[in-house]
Image (spheres, grey):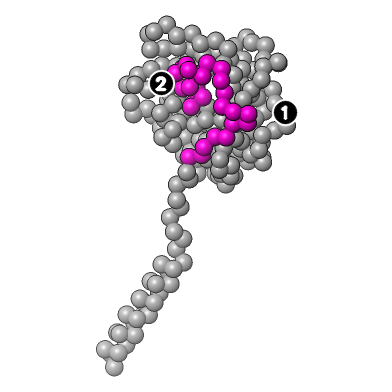
Amino acid sequence: MASGSRLGGVALLAALLMSLTACTPPPQQPQPYPDVRWDGGAPTEFADSEWVMAVRASLEAQAVARNRNDFTIEQLVDTTGPDLRDRLSASAVRTVSAGEVTRLLPGPWPFTPVVVDADGSGKAEVTGCLATKWANDAGTPPPSFGAVGITYRLEQASGSIRVMSTAGADLDCSQTELPVGVFDPAPTPSGVTSIDDIVRAEPDAR
C-alpha cells in the first residue's frame, strides 16, 4: 500500500512539473535591428564622407536604443562614445521617472550636414541641421518638424569612428531640407514603465 502511495505521489509531482513547464512563457527573442527605408532615396550630402556616414550610423543607433530603452545595443556602442550614451540613458530615466510614455522615433534623426572639418588627426567635426520634434506616440513621421544647428565631434580609433560629443551650432536651418527615413519594421512601444527596466548605458570597455 505504501509503495502504491509513493508511486501516486511521483506521478502527481511529474504532472505538476509538466503543467508548470507548459505555463512558462518561452524566453523573449531579441528584436531584429531594423532596416531604414528612405523617402525619395538615401541622403546624398557628403555621401562619400566617412565622418558623415559615422554620424548617420550613430543617429540611427541612438533612435533604435531610445525606442527600446536599451542603451547597450551593439550598434550604439560601436558608433557612439560612452559620455553620449550615458546622456541618452539618463534622458530615458528622467522620462520614465516623470511617468511619461517613451515617445517613438519613426527612424533615424533626420540630419543634413553642412560642413565637415577633418584635419587628419583621427578627429573631426560634422556640423549641420538636425530635426526637432521628431518623436511621437505613433512612431510615424510627423507632418512637420523643425530643425536646429548642431556639431558632432568624432574620433577614429581601432578602425572605427564614433560620435563622442555634440554642441549647438549657430546655423539658420529654417530652409534646410532634411532627409526622412523610417524603420522597417516600424518601432513598437517599449512597454517600460519603471526605471528598473531601462537597460542603462555601461562604461566603455574599449
Residue occupied by mark 1: 144
In the drawing, does residue 10 fall left or right of residue 71? left
Farthest right residue in view: 143
Q: Nearer the viewer, residue 178 or 200?
A: 178
Q: Residue at x 45, y 51 (%)?
A: 29
User: Is residue 57 on the magenta stretch?
Assistant: yes
Q: Residue at x 47, y 16 (%)?
A: 49
| Quadrant of image for the C terminus | top left
User: Is residue 175 on the magenta stretch?
Assistant: no
Q: Which mark is residue 161?
A: 2
Amino acid under disc 1 = Ser
Amino acid under disc 2 = Ile
Magenta-tinted stretch = 33-58
Could you tell me residue 30's position as x and y percent? 45, 47
Q: Nearer the viewer, residue 79 or 66?
A: 79
Specify whether residue 121 is in view.
yes
Could you tell me residue 52's position as x and y percent? 50, 18
In the drawing, does residue 100 fall left or right of residue 61? right
Around disc 2, counting alpha carbons within 10 Å, would you say few (fewer than 14), some (14 to 19), or many (20 or more)? many
How far apart, in angstroms, are the residues tagged by discs 2 and 1?
32 Å
Specify whether residue 98 is in view.
no
Secondary structure of residue under mark 1 = loop
- Looking at marks 2 and 1 on the same chain, the residue that comes earlier in the sequence is marked by 1
Secondary structure of residue under mark 2 = strand
Could you tell me residue 187's position as x and y percent? 58, 41
Could you tell me if the residues under marks 2 and 1 are in contact, i.e. CB atoms within 8 Å? no
